[in-house]
Image: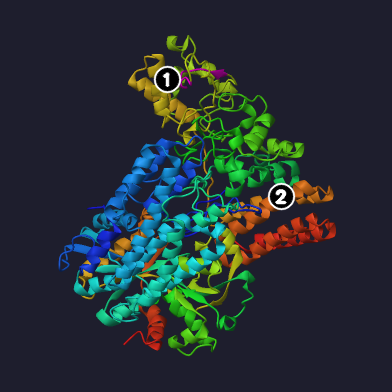
């Protein structure tokens, strides 16, 4: 495996229409299981992580497992649709969109801090004087990303629940300025530094701030629970391979294997995904016109 | 205080320290640095040391920084990632021209930011644009905190420009859903804000000479106003506690005596964890005695570029911590364990201080630039440190003999350990590492492990270290040059012609491993004994000394305590397993801070009321919050 990865290579390949960084045959084959990963930080580190986890999975499953990096959720879903990938790691919202568009199947849900679900929150600085969502009328807010459940849709839904907006489109007129900062950390940092008045992000996003900043921020609204990030499969993936993969991933919960979790976005473990757990996400995506 | 490694990742514009006010001894895990930004920050840091460590500065650009997640050094990375010219910077480094290096490196970062912004604007997809903007922001991070300190209005304007830029890149959505088209006009406008500032301050032909290298914008630097730049550590630094955390063995605690009943010791415990007793960079960075001596032992990961030649080592009389005490010698030492401290004098690797009190004062005042400690402070910290006991080891009797639990190989090794050797002048290993004297002799010997600093130097004698607990304190020797106990055995055999066979070396190693073993060397965390709970118990114990200090109306020592503990308590809240209980801990920290505020105002009834509120809430949290 070539580990010398640069962002230029990533972009060049992306621009050329190939979402994968590593050589990917046109069609997946059952004797090789292909996992699509989405970079969260340094793609080079992710490649090292992928090498470690795919090596372990190969040994566990008895099928060659390969991993490659896609540029974003959209590319990962395209890879699943094209058959370039068999399995991908994804947020709940991109999953329900992929489910609706290509029939993607949820396999496993991440456990984080003891739960397969989490929430989104609206954070403000303690000294801001902002106590309710209504106080944010005309004020500036930063969200993470338009395709983020905890970093956009779910916190925004709290404004709807409070009767402050009626639709996504209303958000533009309710707030002063609304930014998509690019991620939880950027949105939270913008709020903590006073560039914006509030941030919509995961309930754990304040842990991305320094300890001093953490003590200076609080949250004023919390969303209903959101299914945690999920491992999904393309439709038609060989049932036996799929079952072997799920069984191997569940063995990551065992003490002797848990070290491998750090190569997989750092969850505490995995549970078998419950498709009904995504009803709320499907409903919200429909309500906001994201599901056709 | 101990600081369990957390997964906090703090990114743009954050340093590890604060510019002023009470400092927290809770370090922050930084987001990874992009290679050239890392090299630039290392250049600023190393370029401000006297003398400049040019070899290390060169490595900062040619090799990945310590613990980098990137496989390449900055120049190799740039070759693959950028069209930027590096020849002039390479030449400036080779000629050891500090100002030229600063100028070329600063321009390089600015050029790279513009290069990425160009790429963002030319990108055909939102994802590609977002990646380029992300890279540009990571590069800007090399300047960000210095701009914020020097030109806060510009920092805010640029911060908003980054937000606008990120938003304007749009979103690819998923399979055509939730697509947000890029807003190129908005991207151009925010890019102009950033690039205009770079042009005026960082892409200039000639920078004015700078006594202190920094990314302070040139227009501000030319204004001549002093800028209070927050002290930060360069990329690759690691001041987190060792993981696994060493177990602390305190004599009184093992005897069932509560530390809250020992106010002098509890206060000394607080001082051992307090950066407030230092000044300068150590204080601002939250470095305390316990940063290097985790739980009385060592910290194998402690590393500061320019001050550490390898993890677990530090040059405490170098240029960084206290310029007044800079001996201008690159002589970092392996951090020694303080276990059994009352038995291990004299102190210092060469035994230069007979008195632990004198040694401690030297650490505070000279090594870490602290104010002269009061007699009470020295009494307290010495009282605390002399409670450090060795780790229990069921392989050894109290007088240093192997027990029945030891292996046969260790027994064979024990004989070798006590065997006189011609190569040792008729002495044995045990002559210096006396088994019934905690495996030391309280003398300094020149065993040939120190390279002469000058011709005919007679300065190689080092204090005999104990062998107790050494299984967990690798590497070995004063400079940490030997990685294992087996390597130590090999060194002695080779340099002293002991003539040991391979089997004898193995047996002697087995003996050392038995002597240096421990029944329970590390703190055991579980659902009950969590990192936060341990920290919380420590901090509330420290605070208990207020019972004594408030009665004595001891303003100086009360404020030292409240400044140390209140900020640390709040900072440690982020490590709680029960995150929902954090506000209660913040409230508790606020009560302690209020004690300090009231004492500063001379309002003793208010101080006592806040202290009573603290005690009440602490008890409630202890019962509920974990």
Judging by the rendered image, the residue that carries numbered circle 1 is B492
Image quadrant where residue B383 sits: top right
Q: In which quadrant is the C terminus of chain A drawn?
A: bottom left
Label annotation for residue B616: none
Does the magenta-highlighted stretch encompass residue B448? yes
Q: Nearer the viewer, residue B483 or B621?
A: B483
Does the magenta-highlighted stretch encompass residue B336? no
- Relative image position of residue B578 (x, y in whole percent): 56, 64
Q: Main secondary structure of the magenta part?
A: loop
Identify the subunit bearing mark 1: B
Mark sitting earlier along the chain (2/1): 1
- Relative image position of residue B85 (x, y in whole percent): 31, 51
Can residue B389 be seen in this snapshot? no
Q: Which residues are magenta?
A: B444-453
Image quadrant where residue B575 sits: bottom right
The residue sitting at 44% across, 86% down in the picture is A168
- Relative image position of residue A284 (x, y in whole percent): 41, 84
Density class for disc 1 (Cα within 10 Å; few <14, some 14-19, many ≥20) is some
Give the colour scheme of this rendering. Answer: rainbow
Q: Find out whether the residues at labels 2 and 1 contact each other: C-beta distance under 8 Å.
A: no
Camera-side mark, 2 or 1: 2
Q: Nearer the viewer, residue B282 or B194?
A: B194
Q: Is residue B588 left or right of residue A39?
A: right
Q: Nearer the viewer, residue B463 or B125?
A: B125
Judging by the rendered image, the residue that carries numbered circle 2 is B561
The residue sitting at 27% across, 62% down in the picture is A10
Can residue A282 be seen in this snapshot? yes
Vertical comparison of B103 with B395: above or below: below
Badge 2 marks a residue whose secondary structure is: helix
- Relative image position of residue A39 (x, y in whole percent): 34, 63
């Amino acid at each position: 495996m070539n580990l010398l990865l640069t962002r230029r290579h990533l972009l060049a390949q992306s621009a050329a229409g190939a979402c994968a960084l590593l050589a990917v045959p046109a069609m997946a084959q059952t004797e090789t299981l292909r996992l699509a990963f989405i970079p969260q930080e340094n793609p080079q580190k992710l490649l090292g992580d992928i090498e470690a986890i795919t090596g372990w999975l190969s040994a566990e499953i008895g099928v060659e497992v390969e991993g490659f990096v896609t540029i974003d959720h959209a590319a990962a879903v395209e890879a699943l649709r094209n058959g370039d990938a068999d399995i991908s790691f994804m947020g709940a919202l991109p999953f329900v969109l992929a489910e609706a568009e290509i029939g993607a199947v949820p396999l496993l849900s991440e456990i984080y801090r003891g739960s397969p679900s989490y929430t989104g929150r609206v954070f403000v600085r303690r000294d801001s004087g902002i106590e309710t969502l209504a106080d944010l009328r005309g004020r500036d807010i930063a969200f993470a990303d338009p395709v983020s459940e905890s970093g956009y849709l779910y916190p925004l839904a709290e404004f709807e629940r409070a009767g402050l907006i009626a639709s996504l489109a209303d958000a533009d007129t309710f707030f002063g300025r609304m930014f998509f900062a690019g991620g939880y950390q950027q949105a939270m940092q913008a709020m903590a530094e006073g560039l914006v008045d509030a941030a919509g992000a995961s309930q754990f996003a304040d842990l991305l701030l320094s300890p001093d900043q953490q003590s200076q921020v609080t949250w004023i609204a919390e969303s209903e629970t959101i299914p945690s990030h999920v491992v999904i499969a393309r439709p038609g993936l060989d049932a036996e391979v799929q079952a072997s993969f799920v069984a191997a991933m569940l063995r990551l919960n065992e003490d002797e294997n848990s070290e491998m979790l750090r190569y997989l976005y750092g969850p505490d473990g995995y549970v078998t995904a419950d498709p009904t757990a995504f009803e709320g996400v499907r409903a919200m995506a429909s309500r906001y016109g994201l599901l056709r | 205080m101990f600081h369990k490694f957390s997964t906090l990742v703090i990114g743009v514009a954050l340093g590890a320290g604060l510019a002023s006010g009470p400092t927290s001894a809770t370090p922050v895990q930084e987001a990874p640095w992009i290679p050239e930004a890392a090299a630039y920050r290392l250049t600023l840091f190393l370029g401000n040391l006297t003398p400049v460590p040019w070899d290390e500065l060169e490595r900062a650009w040619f090799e990945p920084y310590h613990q980098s997640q990137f496989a390449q050094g900055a120049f190799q990375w740039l070759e693959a990632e950028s069209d930027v010219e590096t020849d002039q910077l390479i030449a400036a480094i080779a000629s050891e021209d500090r100002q030229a290096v600063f100028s070329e490196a600063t321009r390089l970062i600015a050029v790279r930011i513009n290069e990425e912004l160009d790429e963002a604007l030319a990108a055909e997809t939102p994802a590609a644009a977002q990646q380029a903007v992300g890279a540009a922001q990571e590069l800007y991070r090399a300047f960000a905190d210095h701009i914020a300190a020097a030109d806060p209005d510009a920092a805010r304007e640029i911060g908003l420009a980054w937000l606008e830029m990120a938003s304007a890149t749009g979103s690819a959505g998923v399979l055509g859903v939730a697509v947000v088209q890029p807003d190129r006009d908005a991207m151009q406008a925010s890019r102009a804000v950033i690039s205009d500032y770079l042009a005026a301050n960082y892409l200039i032909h000639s920078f004015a000479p700078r006594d202190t290298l920094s990314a302070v914008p040139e227009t501000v630097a030319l204004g001549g106003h002093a800028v209070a730049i927050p002290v930060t550590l360069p990329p690759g630094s690691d001041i987190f506690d060792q993981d696994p955390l060493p177990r602390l063995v305190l004599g009184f605690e093992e005897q069932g005596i509560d530390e809250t009943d020992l106010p002098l010791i509890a206060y000394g415990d607080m001082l051992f964890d307090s950066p407030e007793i230092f000044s300068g960079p150590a204080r601002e960075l939250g470095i305390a005695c316990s940063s290097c001596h985790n739980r009385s032992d060592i910290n194998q990961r402690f590393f500061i570029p320019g001050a550490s030649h390898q993890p677990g080592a530090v040059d405490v009389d170098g240029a960084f911590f206290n310029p007044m005490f800079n001996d201008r010698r690159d002589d970092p030492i392996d951090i020694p364990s303080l276990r059994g401290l009352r038995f291990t004098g004299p102190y210092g690797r060469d035994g230069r201080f007979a008195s632990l009190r004198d040694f401690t004062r030297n650490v505070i005042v000279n090594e870490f630039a602290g104010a002269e400690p009061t007699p009470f402070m020295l009494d307290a910290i010495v009282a605390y440190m002399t409670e450090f006991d060795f780790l229990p080891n069921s392989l050894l009797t109290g007088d240093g003999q192997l027990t029945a639990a030891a292996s046969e190989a260790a027994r064979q090794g024990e004989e070798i350990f006590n065997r006189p050797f011609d190569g040792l002048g008729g002495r044995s290993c045990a002559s210096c590492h006396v088994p019934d004297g905690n495996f030391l002799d309280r003398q300094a010997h020149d065993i040939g492990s120190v390279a002469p600093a000058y011709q005919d130097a007679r300065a190689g004698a080092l204090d005999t270290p104990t062998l107790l607990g050494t299984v967990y304190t690798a590497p070995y020797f004063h400079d940490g040059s030997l990685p294992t106990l087996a390597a130590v055995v090999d060194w002695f055999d080779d340099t002293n012609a002991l003539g040991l066979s391979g089997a004898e070396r193995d047996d002697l190693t087995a003996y050392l491993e038995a002597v240096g073993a421990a029944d329970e060397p590390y703190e055991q965390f579980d659902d009950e004994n969590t990192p936060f709970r341990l920290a919380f118990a420590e901090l509330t114990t420290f605070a208990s000394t207020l019972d004594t200090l408030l009665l004595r109306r001891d303003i100086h020592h009360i404020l030292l305590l409240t400044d140390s503990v209140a900020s640390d308590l709040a900072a440690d809240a982020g490590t709680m397993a029960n995150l929902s209980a954090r506000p209660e801990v913040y409230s508790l920290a606020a009560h302690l801070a209020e004690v300090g505020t009231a004492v500063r105002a001379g309002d003793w009834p208010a101080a006592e009321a806040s202290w009573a509120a603290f005690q009440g809430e602490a008890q409630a949290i202890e019962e509920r919050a974990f």
